[in-house]
Amino acid sequence: MRAVDIIRAKRDGNALTREQIAWMVTGASDGSVPPYQLSAWLMAVWLRGMTPDETTWLTDAMVDSGVRVDLSAVPGIKVDKHSTGGVGDKTSLIIAPVVAALGVPVPMMSGRGLGHTGGTLDKLESIQGFRTRLTLDEFRAQVADLGCALIGQTDEVAPADRTLYALRDVTATVESLPLICASILSKKIAEGIDALVLDVKTGSGAFMAREDDARALADALVGLAERSGLRVAALLTQMDVPLGRTIGNALEVRECVDVLRGGGPADLVELSVELAALMVWLGQGRPSLEAARDAVREALADGRGLAAFRAIVQRQGGDVGMIDDPATLPQAPVRDMFTAPGEGYVARYDAGLLGRAAVQLGAGRARAEDAVDPAVGFDLLAVPGDRVVAGAPLIAIHARTAADVAAVRPMLAEALTMSATPPAPRPLILDRLGLAATR
Ligand code: URA
């Protein structure tokens, strides 16, 4: 085969064969197809799209470029969750241990934050000593022993995706549904899972800001996951305002511990219960979705989820004292307050702007190689719907320096919308797709 023929076929709008796609992906992983031809091919795919079959074959080829983790020694249906990312999106730390505590294994591989969205690995690493890099043998053993491990993608998982994603990033070919879907799902399938719950977010803090785009992504992901043999359910959720009351790594761990102790903000609890219940139900841990919801609420209320999280932290080398007493998590040296400019209702905090303000403080990274500051971020003391007087505390700022506080103040002012009348309540869960749509 020749790369030029495959590029020309796609350029002219033809569907490729399984063999042609596998040949290009092999070329991406072993270097036998040069980056300029891979880039031309990616642009042809961006322009012409792929059929469902082509997307499935691309996903298979990307999985086959690395190892597929063999979890057959762990009994039960293995379930993971993928979120397309948001601001204050911390549900993984809550739902992975709760689902494992209910007997459904969760081999979870997560990512780091990039741009204004946070990442599970960064949050976990704010716990002193927590190791997110385990070998695949350690990963398998921990899932067998504890029912859950929380790690980063290892080098062996879908290596072709790393090469292709790096090229997409610099050739304006990221925003392509078949390329996005194959990228996300190849990494999930390679983890060795049987079922997947997707949280596809829309709004200013999401990867897909427009609801139509997010819905198209959710549809495409569900279709591809089903064709790839996974049991799958998806939620389309609102990410126009941050999830929960905290943004920033250690602050978010503290909030997750609150939820695992049976407390926490209503929106975070609602989404965590729904996602965890879907995982338990897909994993056949309970006979119905309603029974799964009840089981999740009980495991949050009686401390089984917290005990599972503590065991995971301990096993991965983290300081469990920080879970027992979240006040010992990293603390920022400078605390300041953003207050209400006038009397009225808090109508909205723009999630995208608050996410960018958190990156400005050091809570996130602008480039993949940047380090994050675990301690900095925001605590939302008043949330949409709250009535406040002028000067009332709205956002506690946790910063490294006073100059950082000064830099983010105008961003917070821009992110805030006040109103004279109560804002209309916003539904958090906008739609359900896949198996969940029928229940
Ligand atoms: N996340 C991924 O892993 N891949 C994409 O292409 C987009 C988002």
Image: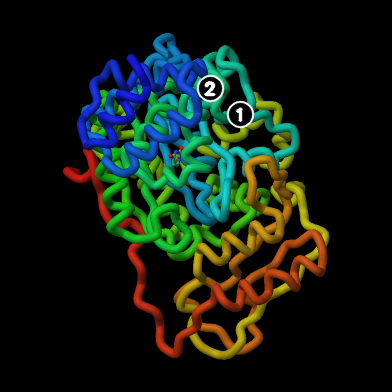
- The residue indicated by pointer 1 is 311
Question: Across the whole image, how many numbered discs are drawn on residues?
Answer: 2
Q: Which residue lies furthest to the top in this view?
A: 73
Which quarter of the figure is the C terminus placed in?
top left
In the depicted view, which residue is nearer to us: 26 or 394? 26
**Residue 187, above or below 398:** above
- Residue 5 image point, x, y percent: 30, 24
**Residue 148, above or below 266:** above
Q: Is residue 197 left or right of residue 408?
A: left
**Residue 272, above or below 396:** above
Ligand 1 within 8 angstroms of badge 2 C-beta: no
Q: Tell me how far mark 1 sits from mark 2, CA to CA.
A: 8 Å
Which residue is depicted at the point 44% across and 55% down?
A: 206
Label 2 packing within 10 angstroms: few (<14), some (14-19), many (20+): some
In the depicted view, which residue is nearer to us: 58 or 95? 58
- The residue indicated by pointer 2 is 146
SS at circle 1: helix
Q: Three-letter amino acid code at disc 2?
A: Leu
